[in-house]
Image (cartoon, rainbow, N blue to C red):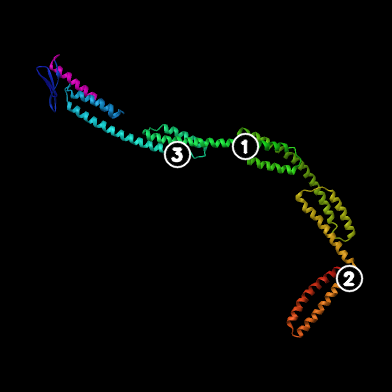
Amino acid sequence: MSSDPWGRVDETGTVYVRTADGEQVVGSWQAGSPDEALAYFKRKYEGLVVEIGLLERRVRTTDLSAKDAQTAIDHLREQVDAHHAVGDLDALRARLDKLVEAVEARREERKAQKVKQSDEARHAKEALVAEAEELAQSEQWRAAGERLRALVDTWKGLPRLDRKSDDELWHRFSHARSAFSKRRKAHFAALDAQREDARKTKEKLVAEAESLSGSTDWGPTAARYRELMAEWKAAGRAQREHEDDLWNRFRGAQDVFFAARSSVFAERDAEQSENLKLKEELAEEAEKLLPVTDLKAARAAFRSINERWEAIGHVPRDARPKVEGRMHAVERAIQESEEAEWRRTNPEARARAAGLTGQLQAAVDKLKGQIEAARAQGNTAKAEKLERELEGRQALLDQALKGLQEFGG
C-alpha cells in the first residue's frame, strides 16, 4: 500500500483522493507500482492547475466573452468533480468559484459599459439629428452641404441602438438631409433661371451699347450709357461662362464712344481756352473806356469791342460768368452815363421836375401854417393829424429836390 498527503493506493490497486467530503475513488491502477499510480494522477492534477491558471489569465488580460469563459469554467469543474486527479481538488474548486465571480463581475461591467455606450450613442445621434434639422434650414449651401456629409460619416461610426430607436432617429436625420437637398436644388434652379434672364437682358444691353458706340450726339448718348450701366447692375449676374464675355463687349462699346468724345472735347477745350484769352483781352480793352469822359467816343468804341466779342466762340463754362461780368459792368457804366446826360439835356423833364417841386414846397408851407393855427387854437388832435400829413409831403419834396439836382439845377 502507498500513500500521499492527498491520496493513496490500496492493496487492490484502487486509487483514492482526499477531499473535505472524505476520500473519493480516483480510479484503478494495475499497470505498475502504487507510486507510479500516484505520480500519474498527480500529473493529472498538475494539468488541471495549469489549465485553470491559463483561464484565469485569459479572463484577467483578454476580452474573452463571459459566455466562453463560463463554458471553459464548467468544463474544468466537470474534470475536478470527476476526481480523476490526486491533489487539493477543493483548492481548485475555490479557484473556479472565484473565477465565476470574476466573470460575473466582468459581465456586469460590460453590461453597464454597453448601456453607457448605448446612451452615449443615443445622445450622439440625437445631437446629429438636431444639427441636421437646423442645417436643413440653412442657406449656406456649400458649408451646410459639406457639414451634412460629415455628419453622415460620423453617424456611420456610431454603434446601432435598438432597432426602433435607431430607425426613428435615422428617419429624422435622413428627412433633414432630403429637405436641405430639395431646398438647395430649388434655390439653384431659381438662380439658374435668374442668371438666364440676366443673360438675355445683358445681351440686349450689349447690343444697344454697341449700336451707340459710333454716335457723336455726345450729351444724350453719354446719358444713355449711364442709364445702360444702371440697368446692367440691376440685371444681376449671368452664368459665369457668359458674364465676362458680355461685360467685355459692353465695356468695350462704351470705351469706343467715350474715347471719341474725349478726343473731341479735348480739341474743344483747347479752342475754348484760346477764346477765353481773346475775350479777356477785349474785356481789358473795354475797361479802359472808364470812367466815361467822352460819351459818344466811349459808345462807339464799346460797340466795336462788342462786335469783336460776338465773333469769338464759346469759352469754358466755369470761366464764362467772370469774363462776361466784366463786359456787363462796362456796358452798365456807359448806360448810366447816357441816362445822366439825357437828364441834363432834357428841358421838358427839368421843367416838370421844377413844377412838381414848387407844388410840393407850397403844400408843405401851407401845412406848416395850418399846424401852427391848430396849436394856437389848442386843437392838438388836428395838429398831430396835419403833422403826419406833413411828414408824407416833406418826404415827397425831398425826393423831388434830389431829382431836380440831377438835372443840374
Residue 351 - label: 2
Q: Position of residue 238 (x, y in %)?
A: 62, 36
**In this view, the mark in front (3 or 2):** 3
Residue at image position (45%, 39%) is 131
Residue at image position (31%, 34%) is 111
- Count numbered badges in the picture: 3
Q: CA distance from mark 1 to mark 3?
A: 36 Å
Q: Amino acid at mark 3?
A: Glu
The main secondary structure of the magenta stretch is helix
Name the foreground residue: 211 vs 349: 211
Figure quadrant of the C terminus: bottom right
Q: Which of the two discs, 3 and 2, labels the residue nearer the N terminus?
A: 3
Q: Could you classify mark 2 by the number of other residues whose Cα lies within 10 Å: few (under 14), some (14-19), or many (20 or more)?
A: few
Q: Which of the two discs, 1 and 3, labels the residue nearer the N terminus?
A: 3
Name the foreground residue: 33 vs 192: 192
Residue at image position (87%, 66%) is 343
Q: Amino acid at mark 1?
A: Asp
Name the foreground residue: 11 vs 144: 144
Tag 3 residue: 131
Q: Could you classify mark 3 by the number of other residues whose Cα lies within 10 Å: few (under 14), some (14-19), or many (20 or more)?
A: some
Residue 391 - label: none
- Left or right: 50 as drawn, with respect to 228: left
Residue 197 - label: 1
Name the foreground residue: 85 vs 241: 241
Q: Position of residue 319 (x, y in %)?
A: 77, 51
